[in-house]
Image (tube, grey):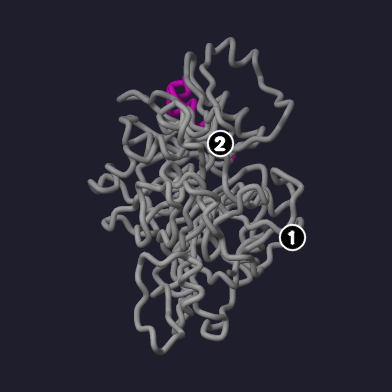
Amino acid sequence: MRALTYEGPHTIAVSTMADPVPSDANGAVVRITAAGICGSDLHIYDGHGFSTDLGFCVGHEAVGEVVEVGSGVTAFRPGDRVMVPASTGCGRCEACRANWVAGCTNGGSGCYGLSHGLEGSQAEAVAVPNADTNLVALPDSISDDAGLTLTDNFPTAWYGARRARIQPGDRVTVVGLGPVGQFSVMSALLMGGSQVFAIDLVPERREAAAKLGATPLTEQDPIAELRELTGGQGTEVVLEAVGADATIELSLRAAARTGRVSVVGVNQTRNFPMNLRLAQVKELEFSIGLCSVQRELPALLRLVAAGRVDPSVVVTHHFGLSDGPAAYELFAHSAPDCVGSARWSSTRPDEFLTSCRRSARRRPPLAGPVSRRYGSGWRSVDRQQKRLDRSGSWSDRRRAGQRFPSAAHRPKRSVPSSHSSWPIAMRMSTTTQRSANSI
């Protein structure tokens, strides 16, 4: 199969890897119909990853179709449409049974695409361990674009807002307006926040947050403006969605006395210079952690199904899988201070769908999801076999002649060398190329 692999700093390659197989009786294989590039993937791309491995498949945001299951899998079968949450667990310990996979006591807690230990999902297929716990059914009423945001970005934002214990009437500040930041705005409003203030260096991101109902603050001195708008107090809740030392410090300053600061941005600083004097004088509550996607999904799926929120609005770009390396380069170097998450879309053959996520400590924002799809999916090259039984395994299908469209059948695509602003929606299909401003 084809996959995007990390070959060293600033080097992502389209590589051929062995077809995945279930790791054991409890595992499954999912054919990926949409996948994404996250800000964490850009950390890896920049050479600041989570292991020293090279040649591993990257990515941890994906949706797709189950094509093979082990004998111990009871909740899923081939043909099921599923989400592949970024977080994994053993499925057997008390924490995992409560969907708190980040607290797995059997060593099963992990994430795809950080090393060879668990290959990523920016590929034609991915092996999923402990499938009954680490897969979530995707209802037909929810699009792949929306489902993809539910594998990491939206649950992470919801987790941060939930830990901040937002109460009806609370004023909330969101620091960082990439996908997680935009979802933090949505989460704060859904939980009853009376007013949400939005901070980001990029005007287009602030405008996007304003369309969701937030009050954007100017980049020159957002803290001074915030104090002016809140009578010198700050806000009861601050949600930090970047993970940079500077933005965490800014979040502490934005909080009102006895306020609550919740950090979901990934920070790998081992000696973070936290201003404890400021936190102590203001009597702040500070929370930080890693999201267990499985635990947050039930509430979010109900909200999306009820039409309360449309998570697909963060998606802005589409690229072909063959343009994956160029997509990484675009998101990493299009502007200063930018980190992001990206997704692949399944609406067109071999297509990437991407959205932006902003980080103040890196290049400016284009972080989204790079999402990718393979149109009609399986195709048979055996003229005598018109259809293949859905119960056939991944390996059976390969032997029967069914495979993904070959490179010869895919159109060549080009990636724009620059973008004037964010957000921009861009799709490239097999017949046309077009771009349009859109959120």
Picture layout, residue 285 above or below residue 148: above
Q: Secondary structure at mark 2?
A: loop
Would you identify the image quadrant in which residue 265 lies? top right
Image location (x, y in percent) of residue 368: 52, 54
- Residue beneath label 1, please? 7
Magenta region, residue range: 220-237
- C-alpha distance separating marks 2 and 1: 25 Å
Residue 317 visible in the shown view: no
- How crowded pointer 1 is (Cα within 10 Å; few <14, some 14-19, many 20+) is rated as some
Please tell me which residue is depicted at 52% across the width and 85% down the height of the picture.
409
- Residue beneath label 2, please? 109
Amino acid residing under circle 2? Ser
Which mark lies nearer to you, 2 or 1? 2
Residue 296 lies within the magenta run: no
Please tell me which residue is depicted at 35% across the width and 42% down the height of the picture.
213
Please tell me which residue is depicted at 45% across the width and 41% down the height of the picture.
216
